[in-house]
Image: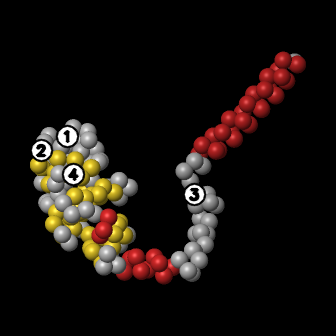
Amino acid sequence: MTETTRRNVVLGAGGAGLAAILTACASYGSPTTEAVAEPPAEEPSSEAPKKKKAAAGGGKALADTSDIPEGGGKVFENEKVVVTQPTAGDFKAFSAVCTHAGCTVATVSNNTINCPCHGSKFSIEDGSVADGPAGGPLEEKKISVDGDKIRLA
């Protein structure tokens, strides 16, 4: 009879543990008190005008116009955008994702946007393929120039 009692104790404890695990698994992905918690406190009021000013100017400022060399450009990896200045005061923007294999272009030199993965080159004027293996142009992105700031539109 002692074996039966031990078995019942072990099975009872194991069953309780299994029930706890199943209960935890059943609630996985369900809303919790954290999901309905209050949103984080707003930023201090001194920050609010800066955000509004940036939004009013056409989006996030990428660079100053002086950061983009005439006849060249600059790659913004985090934004996946490349900004060029083919001629003085004429700024263009394109996706920095190569149309060949999806790599991020790395440099702008000799009037081309250059992908390091397979050697594709794109025109700084219109994003067209200057040298393959890419088969299509870089997608044009909208920007605005506000004073000396270049912003994503």
Residue count near mark 4 (Cα–Cα under 10 Å), binned few <14, some 14–19, many ≥20: few
Q: Are the residues tagged 2 and 1 within 8 Å (C-beta)?
A: yes
Which amino acid, mark 1? Gly
Quarter the N terminus occupies = top right
Separation of disc 3 and disc 4 at Cα? Answer: 52 Å
Q: Measuring from the top left, give residue 100's x and y in whole percent.
A: 19, 43
Separation of disc 1 and disc 4 at Cα? Answer: 13 Å
Frontmost of labels 1 and 4 is 4
Separation of disc 2 and disc 1 at Cα? Answer: 8 Å
* Residue sitting at x 57%, y 57%: 31
Frontmost of labels 2 and 3 is 2
Q: Measuring from the top left, give residue 58's x and y in whole percent.
A: 32, 76
Q: Measuring from the top left, give residue 32's x and y in whole percent.
A: 61, 57
Name above or below for residue 49 compared with residue 98: below
Q: Which type of secondary structure does the marked residue at label 1 adopt? A: loop
- Name the disc covering residue 119, or none: 1
- Name the disc covering residue 90, or none: none
Residue 133 shown left or right of residue 66 in the figure: left
Which amino acid, mark 4? Ser
Q: Which type of secondary structure does the marked residue at label 2 adopt? A: strand
Residues 12 and 119: in front is 119
Residue 152 shown left or right of residue 90 in the figure: right
- Name the disc covering residue 109, or none: 4
Which residue is labeled 2 in the image?
Answer: 131
